[in-house]
Image (spheres, rainbow, N blue to C red):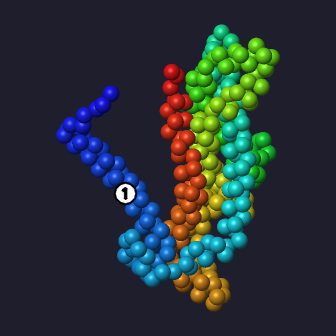
Amino acid sequence: MRYRITPIGVMTNIIIYAILVTAAVSCVLPMINILATSFSEPGPAMAGQIGLWPKGFSLSAYNFIATNGAFWRAAGVTVKRLVLGVIVNTVLTVMCAYPLSKTARRFPQRKYYIAFFLWAMLFSGGLIPTYLTVYRTGIMNTIWALILPGAVPLGNVILMMNFFRNLPDEIEEAAIIDGAGHWTVMLRIYVPLSTASLATVTLFAILGHWNAWFDGLIYNNSMDSYPLQTYMQTILSLDLSTISTMSDAVKYAQLSDRTVKTAQVFVGCFPVLVFYPFLQRYFTKGLVVGSVKG
């Protein structure tokens, strides 16, 4: 069937593309300004004179970040958190979503678990009870304090559950007839067929762990165990009046709060900006297919 493009259709497409381009530019321009400010001299940066191009090109802000050992320790904590956290989140998401995707006839207790998870999504214990729980379990100041409180992302469980429910029941029935158990069906059939949804929940887990900073602040008493985002949040409170040596004075004279802050923002965003496009093609499909039951 051929579709004839009418003048109204052409005008509609122009308006839609104009809106999309405007939205894209509004997202890109602030990032360009942040990057330009981070590479600028302290004077123009503090005066707010930076547009889309740096003034007085300088790498002092990045040198300050890169030569600080605490920065690399925090980056190591974040990498460790990403690896362990994403594995824990993904494994528990799949293990929760698989049984919940079964019908009430095959899993009669399903409704109770669904009700429990929905209640947990709507209501939380609050900051103080959560802190006390983490404290009483003895995982304060460890990497597990950053992972276990959010080990089961319920939104991802529901997304994955709906994706599993969209898979044909005949595939599982054929595998069971051939002697496969639930573990075999889940690991060798459901998981390989769920690449799009797995990529989506993995991306959510990566972004969640990478951007999290508040839990590192309340569950860690030592700055040496801070993740990267928490470290970058606290370093902004640096008191330049505590300089004790002439070499420190020279180093800090080349910095400004604005250049250091923008450099930290860009460093914090850069890995996600690099990694995100590789999962983008799975993102839309996994989000749409996993959000509704066909």
Q: Is residue 248 above or below residue 89?
A: below
Q: Nearer the viewer, residue 184 or 1?
A: 1
The vertical placement of 104 against 149, above or below, is above
Say which of 97 and 132 sits in front.
Answer: 97
The residue at the point 54 percent across, 84 percent down is 253
Specify the amino acid type for callout 1. Val
Q: Secondary structure at mark 1?
A: helix
Circle 1 residue:
25
Residue 205 versus residue 171: which sits nearer the camera?
171
Where is residue 226? Give x, y as percent: 68, 59
Q: Is residue 96 visible?
A: no
Q: Position of residue 4 (x, y in %)?
A: 25, 34
Above or below: residue 80 compared with residue 178: below
> Would residue 131 appear left or right of 240 to someone viewing this image?
right
Image point (54%, 51%), residue name: 277
Q: Quadrant of the N terminus?
A: top left
Q: Could you tell me if residue 161 is visible in this image?
A: yes
